[in-house]
Image: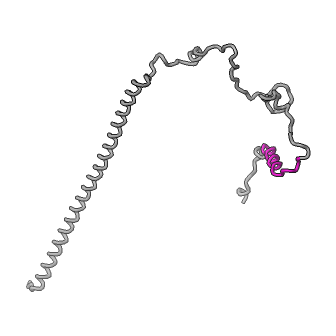
Amino acid sequence: MNFTSDRVRSIGWISVLVICGAVSIGLTLRVNAVKSQVHDTEKRMVWVKQDIDFLETEFQTRSNQQALKQLNDLEFGYKAPIAGQYIEGERQLAALGTAAGPGAPQPIRYANAEKPEDGDGSSLLAMVSPVTGATAAALPESTEKPGSKGRDPEREAIARDAAAIGKRLARIEVAEAAQQ
């Protein structure tokens, strides 16, 4: 084979380009490896900073607890409860109570939802007004004046709606969308 000088030069240039391409690929890989190491180092630095912040906070908290304990011992004298100060149950709690003295108010009684036995058929419980002493069933139904009817139609509409709310809540209406 007879190589001419032009052919040798073109083979030389191609080999130089291939070598330069290989070196540039090698350098790119090395740069990316160094970037990865830098990124890992930055992540470790952030972790160490967070750890330092956590330790500083814990140190300040513990020093504040010690300062609070010293202040408590000096100023207030509070102490943690000991085992003998705890109550074992309801009976021991009840034993701590004292009998009512003379002139003491009656204990509070809780209302119950039982219907009265007087057979009047009303579902209204026998509630007593603390001011008048009258039961709620004995109060008059309406306190309106005879001439005030029709003065406030909005109030009458609200009263009608309130009276019919039990019927509306008890009724189940089927949605029309299911039929379509």
Q: Is residue 179 above or below residue 100?
A: below
Report the residue at 89% width, 43% height from top: 145
* Res. 17 image quadrant: bottom left
Whether residue 53 sits left or right of residue 28 in the image: it is right
Q: Nearer the viewer, residue 19 or 145?
A: 145
Asked which colour scheme the image uses, the reply is: one colour
Residue in view at x 81 percent, y 44 percent: 163
- Tell me where residue 80 appears, x and y as whole percent: 44, 23
Find residue 39 and report its image quarter: bottom left
Task: Judge by depth and name the residue closer to the eye, 8 or 104.
Answer: 104
Q: Residue at x 33, y 43 (%)?
A: 53
Residue in the picture at 26% in, 57% down: 36
x, y (%) of residue 92?
A: 56, 15
Count up the numbered dots: 0
In the picture, measured across the screen, residue 163 lies left or right of residue 53, that is right
Quadrant placement of the N terminus:
bottom left
**Is residue 156 within the magenta segment?**
yes
Please indicate, yes or no, whether residue 121 appears anywhere in the rendered image.
Answer: no
Query: Start and end of the magenta stretch?
Result: 148-166
Q: Main secondary structure of the magenta part?
A: helix
Q: Residue furthest right?
A: 146
User: Is residue 34 depicted above or below 65 in this figure?
Assistant: below
Q: Is residue 66 left or right of residue 103?
A: left
Residue 108 place in picture, x, y as percent? 69, 23
Q: Quadrant of the C terminus?
A: bottom right
Residue 29 located within the stretch drawn in magenta: no
Across and down, in percent, residue 11 comes to 13, 79
Residue with the most extreme front position:
75
**Which residue is at the front of the view, 114 or 109?**
109
The answer to which of 44 and 78 lies nearer the viewer is 78
Residue 86 seen in the figure = yes
Judge whether 105 appears above or below 44 on screen: above
